[in-house]
Image (cartoon, rainbow, N blue to C red):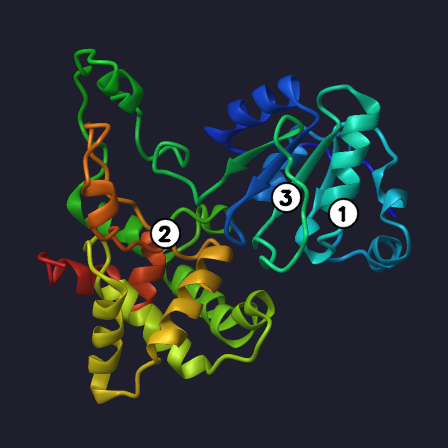
């Protein structure tokens, strides 16, 4: 129960979030890495951990978490506790242990779902920092040179000269494959099979676990298909429901179900909306404008709409 992590993979591609993890471990007692399943949380955490507990695959660790979670906290630090949300009480034990040790860099927690609001958790403020990890960018996958810095642009600096290294057909392929670490070097065929299984797991199992009730997989899938069709559109949730109802004249989720699905899928980090933004501090835009609807990776939208690169290139407006 609880072992040293395997040696760092020589093929690990450094993430932008790695610097955030290092900074968090230097400043606070624990770093929490959150993000969708299969986005690379465990492998990123392993680059910084000296021991680990894998709650999703280690039966002994699962039993210890049930009997006495303190048993999981002993080991070389930083200590990785992977998929901690499977035993949500661990959060409070880690928080208390950080208080008692009074030293930075003690724990790394990873989770692919945010626990239900009914779970009582004390604040980790001043003890833990959260790092959001999403699927990999083109820069992280080495498909982009990263010549133009968004931070520099926001600071008012002149952008460096740069040229895209991918043509339009290659961009379409990257959209369909997405930023999943497990698909690096894999073909479009492999990506489509992976994503079909990923979506099946969400609608058949994951959403039930997170929401605490059985959901109709057909309606969840239609909701996600509507979300995919409205990618990057600032629309109200009622518009998503209307689109779901319009898919082949299908039965649509109720208004209450839509709100439930939205919350559950956000907890799973599958939905990643972009809130309205305005530079004016007192602007009403943030409060009155609907968020732009996004899934956490464009490959999910492509998979839900049954788009391969050829179909995307045949519908350039989309």
Residue 6 at x, y = what percent? Answer: 74, 37
Alpha carbon distance from label 3 to label 1: 12 Å
Alpha carbon distance from label 1 to label 2: 29 Å
* Quadrant in which the C terminus is drawn: bottom left
Q: Residues within 10 Å of mark 3 (few under 14, many from 20)?
A: many
Dot 3: element: strand
Q: Nearer the viewer, mark 1 or mark 2?
A: 1
Residue 158 at x, y = what percent? Answer: 17, 12
Q: Is residue 214 left or right of residue 155?
A: right
**Residue located beneath label 2 in the image:** 297
Residue positioned 34% across, 72% down in the render: 223
Alpha carbon distance from label 3 to label 2: 19 Å
Q: Earlier in the sequence, mark 1 or mark 2?
A: 1
Q: Nearer the viewer, mark 3 or mark 1?
A: 1
Quadrant of the image occupied by residue 134:
top left
Q: Mark 2 and mark 1 in contact (Cβ < 8 Å)? A: no
Q: Nearer the viewer, mark 3 or mark 2?
A: 3
Q: Residues within 10 Å of mark 2 (few under 14, many from 20)?
A: many
**What is the number of callouts on the image?**
3
Q: Residues within 10 Å of mark 1 (few under 14, many from 20)?
A: many
**Residue located beneath label 1 in the image:** 90
Residue 297 at x, y = what percent? Answer: 36, 51
Q: Nearer the viewer, residue 76 or 293?
A: 293
Q: Nearer the viewer, residue 296 or 213?
A: 213
**Residue located beneath label 3 in the image:** 110
Residue 209 at x, y = what percent? Answer: 60, 69
Dot 2: element: loop
Residue positioned 23% across, 32% down in the render: 165
Residue positioned 56% across, 35% down in the render: 130
Q: Is residue 122 above or below residue 202?
A: above
Residue 210's disc is none
């Amino acid at each position: 129960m609880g072992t040293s992590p395997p040696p760092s993979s020589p093929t690990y591609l450094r993430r932008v979030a790695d610097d955030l993890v290092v900074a968090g471990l230097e400043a606070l007692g624990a770093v929490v890495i959150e993000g969708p399943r299969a986005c690379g949380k465990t492998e990123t955490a392993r680059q910084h951990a000296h021991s680990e507990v894998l709650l999703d695959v280690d039966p002994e660790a699962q039993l210890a978490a049930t009997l006495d979670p303190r048993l999981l906290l002993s080991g070389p630090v930083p200590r990785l506790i992977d998929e901690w949300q499977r035993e949500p009480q661990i959060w409070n034990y880690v928080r208390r242990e950080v208080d008692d040790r009074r030293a930075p860099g003690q724990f790394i927690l990873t989770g692919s779902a945010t626990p239900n609001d009914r779970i009582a958790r004390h604040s980790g403020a001043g003890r833990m920092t959260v790092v959001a990890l999403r699927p990999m960018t083109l820069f992280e996958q080495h498909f982009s040179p990263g010549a133009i810095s968004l931070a520099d642009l926001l600071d008012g600096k002149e952008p460096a000269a740069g040229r895209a290294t991918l043509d339009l057909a290659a961009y379409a392929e990257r959209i369909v494959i997405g930023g999943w670490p497990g698909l690096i070097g894999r073909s479009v065929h492999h990506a489509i099979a992976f994503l079909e299984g990923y979506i099946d797991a969400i609608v058949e199992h994951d959403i039930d676990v997170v929401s605490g009730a059985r959901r109709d997989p057909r309606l969840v899938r239609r909701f996600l298909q509507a979300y995919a069709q409205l990618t990057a559109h600032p629309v109200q949730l009622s518009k998503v429901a209307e689109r779901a109802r319009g898919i082949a004249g299908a039965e649509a989720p109720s208004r209450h179900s839509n709100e439930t699905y939205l919350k559950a899928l956000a907890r799973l980090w599958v939905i990643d909306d972009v809130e309205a933004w305005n530079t004016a501090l007192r602007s009403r835009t943030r409060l009155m404008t609907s968020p732009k609807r996004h899934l956490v990776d464009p490959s999910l939208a492509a998979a839900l709409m049954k788009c391969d690169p050829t179909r995307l290139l045949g519908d350039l407006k989309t």
